[in-house]
Image (cartoon, coloured by chain):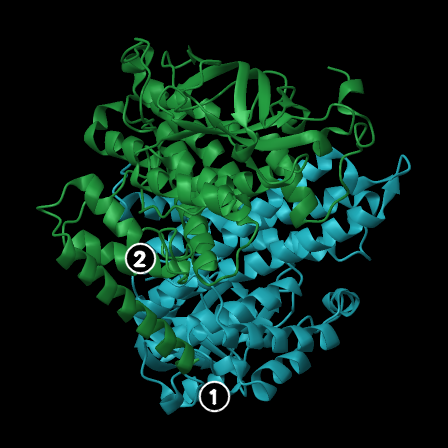
Chain colours: A green, B cyan
Amino acid sequence: MSEETTGADSAAAELRRRTQELLAAHPPLETDQLDFLKARFDAGLAWVHYPEGLGGLGAPRALQAVVDAELESAGAPDNDPRRIGIGLGMAAPTVLRFGTEEQKQRFLRPLWVGEEVWCQLFSEPGAGSDLAALGTRAVREGDEWVVNGQKVWTSSAHLARWAILIARTDPDVPKHAGITYFICDMTDPGVEVRPLRQITGEAEFNEVFLTNVRIPDAHRLGEIGDGWRVAQTTLMNERVSIGGMRIPREGGMIGPISQTWRERPELRTHDLHQRLLKLWVEAEVARLSGERLRQQLVAGQPGHEGSGMKLAFARLNQEISGLEVELRGEEGLLYDDWTMRRPELVDFTGRDAGYRYLRSKGNSIEGGTSEVLLNIVAERVLGLPAEPRTDKNVAWKDLSR
Amino acid sequence: MTDLLYSEEEEALRAAVRDLLTDHCDAASVIVRTESDAPHDLSLWKSLADGMGLAGLLVPEAQGGQGATHREVAVVLEELGRAVAPVPYLTSAVVATEALLACDADDLLAELASGRKIGVLAVSLGVAPGGAHKVVRQENGSLYGELTGIADAAAADVLLVPGEDGGLYAVDAGAVTVVPQVSLDLTRPLARVVFDGAAGRRIGDVEPAVRRALRAGAGLLASEQLGLADWTLTETVRYLKERKQFNRPVGGFQALKHRLAQLWLEVVSLRAAARNAADALTTGDDTDVAVAVAQAYAASVAVHAAEEAVQLHGGIGMTWEHPAHLYLKRAKADSIAYGTAGAHREALAELVDLSAP
């Protein structure tokens, strides 16, 4: 125990020393932000758990906090994890695990510093929860693949330089077996991005139409036909990032409604009070569960709680924001703004209660519907029998759709 | 920072307690015992207290205890909850012990810590921390009156009795009349205690002792509720994998899978809330909020888990032979013990500045 502690302490000290070296060589106040981020990447201090030469040092993931704290206190610029969230959370771990050396060298640095934004071309109009049923086709022509199809719910597509894409390369085998994973160039002339307006009035997502998009075989990730397995890495990392956030008390949706309650005594009723207190307790318990999950991850004991956290937050966000619309009474009959916008970032709590109410309806759909997540918990955590499968040994082209 | 995980030592303690309970506290014998005149399992109590020294976990070593913390006690209570063990652990080793820690009665504290004596705080089980409770009156140094709803009084050697003068009195169980009440929870029975001129020794002031005792009781009860809920979920899942209807395991039907997955989520959440309360009682940080949050949440989970166990076992769940009813009765009684969820939400409204209209 004490030896391990000493080991971790000396690793932390070494990271602190390297961070100070970086700061000395590139004084943050005199260095261009992008140049600083590139230098940080090259020093292995971007994501310390990544390998050397790819922005990391092969150090324990938990030690990133040591670097971040040093940089923050020195006033160093950071990258923008929210703007590049899909790249950081989904594309990067997949490229790292399945990419060739050339792909890792080409893509990870501009991804991390934020020069290149990524989006994700997975879901289709006919393939949502049943993602493996997707129909976008990729046909090989020499050293290239020709891709045709339609994707949907693509956030950041209008900003993205690259996309992770899954497409069907073999329709004659069962659906999971005929998928291949690609990196798609969003500047290809065959890529058309159309805003998709939602119930909030915003166009946070896009539809993406792919017409004879030519992808070099060098931009394939993993083996031909192995795309489903590759995609599991992407999706697993998505869930971890959803469940692993640290939030302070009243840090989520319960924050704004609690403030409204405190500032507007004229809105209070006994019925609303009972419901608010119940939700406050549930929000606090969900926060503690998220914190416990985070502590498990740091201790190297990942649990299945990530799926559970997403379920809990989706329900709470919907109930709390719904209650707040009611709490506001006559004001709840109004809406702040129906203008169609294409936001770069989605701030769930940045607008009024009506917006939060409508946007939170997506929380139980995006990233896995609550119904599918309940199945996952029941089967993978509790070990209950799987749903009967009628598509198991059927070629994709013979499935009903 | 709040530590919501279990340490290796805590896991080792859990394993030891679970082994003991597996060998000496099976459901069938608990059911038989509840129908006898002696509902408490005093030989199990002796193994836990004498054999393992668990009665003195909260007592500093200098005062004859183990000098452990609420975190370890919480782990013991999780296991006792999993077994609906009929032992006065929560009432004697937690609530009465915490009351004595606020008083000046080191002799009694040491006796409770050793497990040689069982102590019970003579406050009705339903009273929340900070809630109103009954007192007895004194005349010429003797106590007169009647207190009801006193959990585990039938097993007590000594009662800690609130007097109307604001003093807490230690009273020998032989000096009072204990009349068992027919209780919903057969494994933690209640009794009426009649004081007819009983001699009492003043050991301290009621207010700080009772407040401290009930706060610890409420906070750690959440761990018992967690253990109870965890057992009923595990057992129900196990049964639904075996039980077949319509030529399929019943647990393969999506309607039931979703219910069990939902319950799992509640149990996982309760684990975080219960750990947080145990840790807060240990460190003294944010304790009132942590205890109120845990108790405002725990009851609905434990009751829901036990109710699902009864329903999903079908007709078997309604029988006296199957232990599901023991868990339902304990869970429902626990939902009132040391304050209902509503009482704790009311307390929270003040603590976190969300005042009533």
Label 2's element?
A: helix
Please tell me whether residue B355 is drawn above or below residue A70 in the rendered image. Answer: above
* In front of the other: A249 or A369: A369
Residue at position x 47%, y 24% from top? A362
Q: Which is in the foreground here, disc 1 or disc 2? A: 2
User: What residue is shown with label 2?
Assistant: A65
Q: Which residue is farthest top?
A: A339
Q: Residue at x 52, y 60 (%)?
A: A301
Disc 1 versus disc 2: distance between alpha carbons?
A: 48 Å
Name the subunit of mark 1. Answer: B
- Find residue A272 and report its horizontal and vertical position in percent: 36, 28
Q: Quadrant of residue B275?
A: bottom left
Chain name for mark 2:
A
Does the image show residue B357?
no
* Left or right: residue A305 compared with residue B256: left
B53 or A36: nearer the viewer: A36
- Which residue lies at the image location 20% right of the left edge and 57% below the top edge? A22
Q: As shown in the figure, which amino acid type bears the numbered disc 2? A: Ala
The answer to whether A339 appears left or right of B200 in the picture is left
Q: Is residue A270 above or below residue A229?
A: above
**Above or below: residue B326 compared with residue A389:** below
Q: Position of residue B106 (x, y in %)?
A: 37, 88
Name the residue nearer the viewer: B249 or B274. Answer: B249
Residue visible at 28% across and 11% down?
Answer: A337
In the rendering, at what x and y percent does residue B253 appear? Answer: 77, 35
Q: Quadrant of the N terminus of chain B?
A: bottom left
Instruction: Assess disc 2: are there few (<14), some (14-19) or many (≥20) residues with their C-alpha within 10 Å of its C-alpha.
Output: few
Question: Dot 1 lies on which element?
Answer: helix
Q: Amino acid at mark 1?
A: Glu
Residue A250 image-quadrant placement: top left
Q: Which residue has dot 1 on it?
A: B111
